[in-house]
């Protein structure tokens, strides 16, 4: 009997030992193979004191990190926060609108509300819709008062590069023109859908450039003027010729609404385009628009920044963030890797809006001396792991660091 008891106790101990070993083995299979600091292949070894890196599991638990609380320049990864706040306040199905009125003197008035995707093709569709609603018109009056004029975005310069295009309540073609010169040296449009308007031609002659895409406008008034001349051109093509001039003005209580254009794109689709091209113009148009939506018109940079800051504090519970604008072009923006993790966790249901390659969904950012990347790496079951890489001073290769992160999760 004593022998049997000894054998029974021994078997129990063996069972416990094997059970514990099996549980540990099973857990190892479920967890990603971590790369520890000090190992040659560790991404942590490539992060300087000025940089930050963080990798977290599907539940948000941090797997490994370095300098995760350090405030860094997020560059264009900030667009994820802007998109998240826009979805929160406007909803994914929101559509920007543009209104058209006639006053008692038969002037046609256009009132903009910040639609960032009023391209030439859209203005053509609008002109077609207006032809059945107008007998004719005198002046074309542009109401761009939904945004204040001359909004300066920190980080945006005064060059003719498209990324320095100003924002405004009434715009066209991202406030840029794509042009070339014909065989005679004459300035012509490089896009078949976009005519060369008198305003654009005058600006291009002053620039003296030969070809390319440039921004013509330095303020919201110029932007509205360019959009207005496109409207006049497309209406003229359809037999509706204005008898007067294109000028600024406002919609009054005695004016009659004749047409409202609602964008064919939902906010969700606008955001997808913003992410695809990392478009700063779209991001800050949205920022000012949600500022006007929450705090009332006119839209200002201060109102937009306030909405973003309040959302970060009240919804994401972030207190280590500094926001100067909504696109990430400003170096005054500051966010920690741990703060970006909170943004990513909230954005998880919308991650398909980001650029993606296989099971990797991400947003990258680049400024001089700054490289960033943040997003999701899905496992075989589609569960998202989170990663944040903020390189603010090192000369490290962000692509190789990211590959190292993927390898650490078994996704190399």
Image (tube, rainbow, N blue to C red):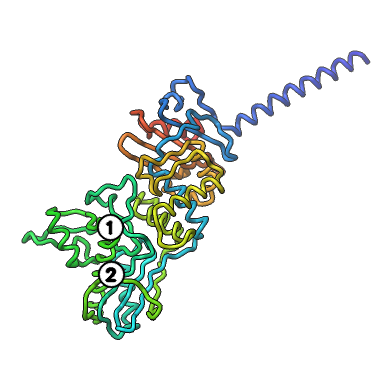
Numbered mark located on residue 219 in the image: 1
CB under 8 Å between discs 1 and 2: no
Residue 11 in the image, given as x and y percentages of width and height: 81, 20
Screen quadrant of the C terminus: top left
What's the distance in space between the residues labelled 1 and 2, CA to CA?
14 Å
Residue 74 in the image, given as x and y percentages of width and height: 41, 40
Does 338 sit left or right of 372 as displayed? Answer: right
Residue 396 in the image, given as x and y percentages of width and height: 36, 29
Q: Which residue is outermost to the top? A: 3
**Residue sitting at x 28%, y 69%:** 248
Q: How many marks?
A: 2
Badge 1 marks a residue whose secondary structure is: loop
Q: Which residue is outermost to the left? A: 184
Does 179 sit left or right of 143 as displayed? Answer: left
**Residue sitting at x 46%, y 52%:** 83
Q: Which residue is outermost to the front? A: 253
Relative to residue 214, is residue 228 depicted above or below?
A: below
Disc 2 designates what residue? 248
Does residue 210 appear in this view?
no
Relative to residue 134, is residue 234 depicted above or below?
A: above
Residue 410 in the image, given as x and y percentages of width and height: 51, 33
Looking at the image, which is closer to me, 141 or 90?
141
**Residue sitting at x 50%, y 56%:** 87
């Amino acid at each position: 009997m004593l022998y049997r008891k000894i054998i029974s106790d021994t078997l129990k101990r063996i069972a416990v030992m094997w059970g514990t070993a099996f549980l540990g083995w099973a857990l190892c299979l479920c967890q990603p193979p971590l790369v520890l600091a000090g190992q040659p292949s560790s991404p942590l070894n490539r992060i300087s004191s000025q940089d930050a890196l963080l990798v977290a599991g599907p539940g948000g638990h941090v797997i490994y990190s370095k300098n995760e609380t350090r405030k860094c320049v997020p560059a264009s990864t900030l667009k994820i926060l802007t998109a998240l706040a826009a979805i929160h306040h406007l909803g994914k199905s929101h559509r920007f609108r543009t209104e058209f009125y006639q006053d008692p003197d038969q002037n046609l008035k256009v009132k903009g509300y910040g639609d960032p995707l009023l391209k030439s093709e859209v203005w053509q569709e609008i002109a077609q819709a207006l032809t059945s609603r107008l007998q004719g018109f005198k002046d074309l009056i542009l109401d761009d008062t939904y945004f204040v004029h001359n909004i300066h975005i920190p980080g945006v310069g005064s060059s003719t590069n498209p990324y320095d295009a100003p924002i405004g309540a009434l715009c066209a073609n991202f406030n840029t023109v794509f042009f070339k010169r014909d065989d005679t040296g004459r300035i012509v449009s490089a896009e078949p859908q976009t005519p060369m308007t008198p305003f654009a031609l005058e600006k291009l002659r002053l620039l003296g450039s030969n070809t390319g895409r440039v921004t013509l406008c330095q303020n919201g008034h110029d932007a509205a003027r360019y959009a207005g001349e496109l409207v006049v051109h497309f209406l003229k093509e359809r037999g509706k010729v204005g008898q007067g001039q294109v000028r600024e003005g406002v919609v009054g209580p005695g004016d009659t609404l004749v047409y409202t254009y609602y964008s064919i794109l939902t906010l969700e689709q606008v955001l997808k385009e913003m992410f695809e091209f990392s478009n700063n113009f779209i991001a800050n148009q949205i920022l000012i628009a949600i500022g006007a939506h929450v705090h009332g018109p006119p839209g200002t940079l201060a109102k937009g920044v306030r909405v973003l800051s309040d959302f970060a504090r009240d919804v994401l519970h972030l207190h280590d963030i500094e926001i100067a604008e909504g696109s990430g072009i400003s170096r005054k923006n500051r966010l920690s890797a741990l703060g970006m993790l909170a943004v990513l966790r909230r954005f998880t249901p919308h991650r398909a809006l980001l650029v993606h390659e296989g099971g990797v969904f991400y947003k990258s950012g680049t400024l001089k001396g700054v490289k960033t990347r943040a997003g999701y790496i899905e496992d075989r079951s589609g569960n998202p792991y989170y990663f944040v890489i903020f390189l603010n001073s090192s000369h490290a290769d962000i692509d190789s660091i990211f590959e190292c992160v993927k390898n650490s999760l078994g996704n190399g």
